[in-house]
Amino acid sequence: MYRVALEDDETVIRIKRGLMNQETVAKLLDLINLAAVLEKSRFAEAKGNILARMLGFPAGVSLLRDPVVNKDGAFTEEERDTLGIRGLLPARVQTMEEQVMRILENLRRKPNDIEKYIYMIGLQDRNKTLFYRVVMDYIEEVMPVIYTPTVGQACLEYGHIFRRPRGIFISAKDRGRMPELLRNWPYRDIRIIVVTDGERILGLGDLGADGMGIPVGKLALYTACAGIHHSLTLPVTLDVGTENEGLLNDPLYIGLKQRRLRGAAYDDFVEEFIVAVEEVFPRTLVQFEDFATFNAFRLLERYRERICTFNDDIQGTAAVALAGLYSALRIKGGKLSEQKILFVGAGEAGQGSADLTVAALVAEGLTVEEARARCWFADSKGLVVKKRSDLTGHKLRYAHDHESIWDLGAIVETLKPTAIIGFSAQRGLFTAKILEAMGRLNERPIIFALSNPTSKAECTAEEAYFGTAGRAIFASGSPFAPVILEGKTMAPAQGNNVYIFPGVGLGVMASGARHVIEEMFFIAAQTLAHQVSDEDLAQGSVYPPLARIREVSSAIAAAVAEVAYRRDLATKPKPDDIPGYIRSLIYEPRYQSYV
């Protein structure tokens, strides 16, 4: 921004970079100062509004209704005069700290999580700076409200709690004009897009356009957890219809009431969207989110070599799971190559996690075949074995020579896994019998119930600890409270993708990486595991506290950027100090002075 001091009282006016060049600014100021000479008194009162309006900066009521620049009661006396908002606010100027106190007081009064979610989204719609201040400073309290697990319920009720639109909705009716729709977004320098078609929202299934809560929530975490400025991000929902009968019959559903596009029509629609993004936002990273398994793998394979993209459900989840395994081995001892891992649920999260685990095992010296032999799958039809005739796609690579077993308890008893990782979205699937067996077969069983939201978790932390006499090394996709067993407090870790995707996105943005490669997620998993302290491990936590998430994200971003430079994927010059450069990019939510 240019800083221009007017002659009459040294008022500083900020002029948005790129809106005008220096010559135009100088001519504008000459005209305004001439007006000041001719009619100084009136100019002294109106100068702020003159410049504000000429430069496109909001003033008056418009300023208070713009969530990017609004400060609510924190506008100074001078700002109130200059920007035409005196009298539109209570007289007392408040500090941000006082505003945070008010937000927390009101948030904690709400009777349930969905009301808390609505309240926080309302704050985001009114004052983004204050919203991110609250989220960052109280992330362990607020993240479960604005994201997992509450966001699942918010998506289920999205059409009923809908207040204001956010992001871009592109429907099947918009074929042929997608660039036009993207240009309706007020910002041009978009670096990260999170896009969903709403077909597999968490473990809740097809929620159609109501799935927009996921991209909105993910991007809020990009800002809160990695410091990527919110103006650089864009949530997108591809509304191609829904198979959810409840939504099709719901008069308050916000999306198209039609069956989903399939086959070539669906592929052409997604292709048109990608082409539009390349045209309008050529420097952006596209994160695919909550697509059905079949489409998720196809789209990732189709576009990963063409654009800068990744799928968080496949790759982000994989990195979180692998990091958890690395940390668990610091507790129980041994190598990854000595483990037998049972993945329960063979969708994109499970298969992505197995693929990254195989890469890690190969890095330890195993062949690909030996590595896959350490990884087993159970799906809704039982153990994944070669004799099954219903296997397709990625499952085939993990189908072993073994007898068919249908019951999960029998599978555990037969295979004797050292780790069991749940991606099934089936609440209570890890029964007391299964947990007892894992505890009996292993001195320190690794039990990860990673399905989201909480209502879909395979078991709770309490069930895992009590079922194994406190010896389980446990992690979950949604947060659980600490558990006290025989006088010892165990703090279960939340294996949430928020530990991975914000840092990966920041590293990609910082380096200008052309593509996101698998090595970036492998290095992200290793970096995350290294951020876990001995104190964390002592209380049973295989991930660092959420309070350290920005520090963790910065470390992952630096590691990812290093990969981009090492693999010749970066488009930006390599800084002498990558971690320092990463830190310089991080947005800090503080109020700016407008005069």
Image (spheres, grey):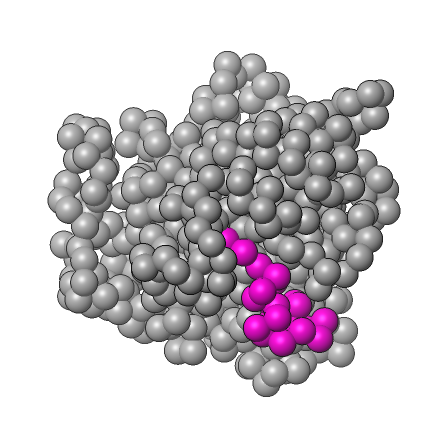
Q: Is residue 67 left or right of residue 12?
A: left
Seen at 68% across and 44% down, the residue is 446
Residue at the (45%, 24%) spot, across then down? 114
From this view, report whether residue 68 is shown above or below residue 562.
Answer: above
Q: Is residue 118 above or below residue 143?
A: above
Q: In the visual, does 463 lie left or right of 156?
A: right
Residue 361 shows in this picture: yes
- Asked if residue 254 lies in the magenta stretch, the reply is no
Residue 107 point in image, percent of width and height: 56, 22
Q: Is residue 572 at least partly visible in the picture?
A: no
Vertical side of 187 occupied by 59: above or below:
above
Q: Which residues are drawn in magenta? A: 356-377
Q: Nearer the viewer, residue 497 or 220?
A: 497
Report the front residue among 482 and 474: 474
Question: Dividing the image into 4 quarters, which one contains the N terminus?
Answer: bottom right
Residue furthest to the bottom in view is 568
Residue 36: x percent and y percent?
49, 53
Q: Residue at x 61, y 61 (%)?
A: 374
